[in-house]
Image (cartoon, rainbow, N blue to C red):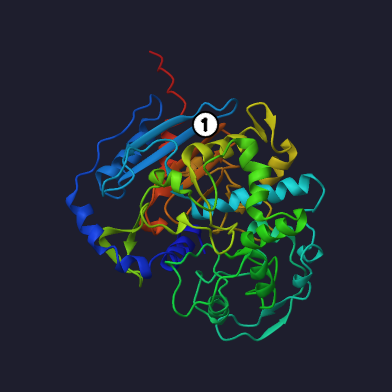
Amino acid sequence: MGQGKMQQIEMNRRGMMASLATSVAGAAMAAAASPAAARSSEPGFGALQGLIDSYVAARKVPGAMVAIVRRGGFRPVYLKAGTTAWEGGAEITPDTLWRIYSMTKPITAMAVMQQVALGNIGIDTPIAEVMPEFARMQALVDPAKGLDAVPAEGPILVRHLLTHTAGFSYAISANGPLEREYRRLGLLPGSGPSTLLPVDGKVPDLQGFLIALAALPLWQQPGKAWRYSVALDVAGGMLERLTGKSFDRVLAEQLFAPLGMNDTGFEVPVSKRARLSTNYAWITPDGKPLAQPVAFDMPAKSDWLRPPFMFSGGGGLVGSTRDYARFVQMLLNEGMFEGRRVMAPETVRLALSNLLPPGVFYDGNKGYGAGAALAIFDTRSTGPRGAPVGLYAWGGAAGTKFQVDPVRGVGVVVMLQFTPSQRFPLDVELQEAMNRDLAPPARPSRA
């Protein structure tokens, strides 16, 4: 199942039940307001600027911010359009805060890769060597029918965590017997107080999550197929075991401090609340499309204003465009950022290579690197939305996107907030805009 479909399921789960009912009035205000005119114009990126302008003009989002970086020093080009909200929104800046949801996954994956480079773990190390509770896993016989299971045919490897091939599922992925057990036990990483349902159990901390998860069967055998899952949340717990530190501290020490990502974390301090954007839903709690979006997580009352139930390596971070552009810059530079070595070049190259087990593909014909999708075929000749080989990219449930393009030496970060993420085809529109802006100039014809 592709990223867009899985993120639709994700947003059916996140934030839709309790908060929509209290936000209907905001939709009427949004419909009455006129789109803000704040925008920027940058020579050379007319297609990308036009794309975000069109989203604001069509009232898909109140505003958006884009960062483009190239190899070398951190000299981002910023594009913007609109404001942070339809209801009294502020001017968007590179330091506006956005919920990045599943764009947390590549960050978690790179923290794991740093531990690989240190020799503390290997790509093909069984995770049970670090977390013994995962030593004797079982896998479901028929995920649709019940919890009957057989012994796993092989161990879960670190590689499987990084590529969603460990055999886990997500409570947001389906409503089968295993997913219902996830809900009953509160195995709901990324959930906040406003998103839990009466049937949901109490969400444990990260180590409690690992213990409860390991006692359940896997949805499928390890290494056999790609399935969107809690794998990167398990990876976060593994990092705690490896380092003896809390997961938030691991990220802060290994990535955020070295990269100067001072506005990225699992909680928005009160002092930064004014910079938090508003998130909008385009569907009802039961998944039906809305004619007008509804504000459901706002700066005045957001789940990110308090500590999370658990540190979610799969979807718990909030951050700024500037911060995520720093992360993308480091990957594009193969581990270097402003003269500092954050990751070894060979580690970055491995992380941005196809790590899927043999014979396994993501979304039909794609590979998967550490925490994000990977183009393993150059499809630019097939049409205006084709991608070069090696394109490493992912998105978040609120529409955010990023790309690292080693072939053309460019990275891009798109920040906006609409849910579910597949409500609009931003993935393909972004690729088309980048291809237009990065196309080589046409050669003059000879008379």
Residue 222 seen in render: yes
Query: Visible in this render: residue 384?
Result: no
Q: Residue at x 64, y 57 (%)?
A: 163
- In the picture, measured across the screen, residue 238 lies left or right of residue 101, that is right
Q: Quadrant of residue 244?
A: bottom right
In terms of image quadrants, where is residue 212?
bottom right
According to the image, label 1 marks what residue? Answer: 69
Nearest the viewer among 22 and 100 is: 22
Which residue is rendered at x = 20% and y = 54% of the image? Answer: 29
| Callout 1 crowding tier (Cα within 10 Å): few <14, some 14–19, many ≥20 | many
Q: Please state the horizontal and vertical placement of residue 207, each as a whole percent of the image.
A: 68, 66
The image quadrant of residue 436 is top left
Q: Position of residue 39 (x, y in %)?
A: 31, 33
Depth order, front residue of 221/79:
79
The one of 249 and 50 positioned closer to us in this rendering: 249
Q: What residue lies at 47% left-to-right and 47% top-to-bottom? A: 401
Percent coordinates x, y for residue 275 in the rendering: 40, 43
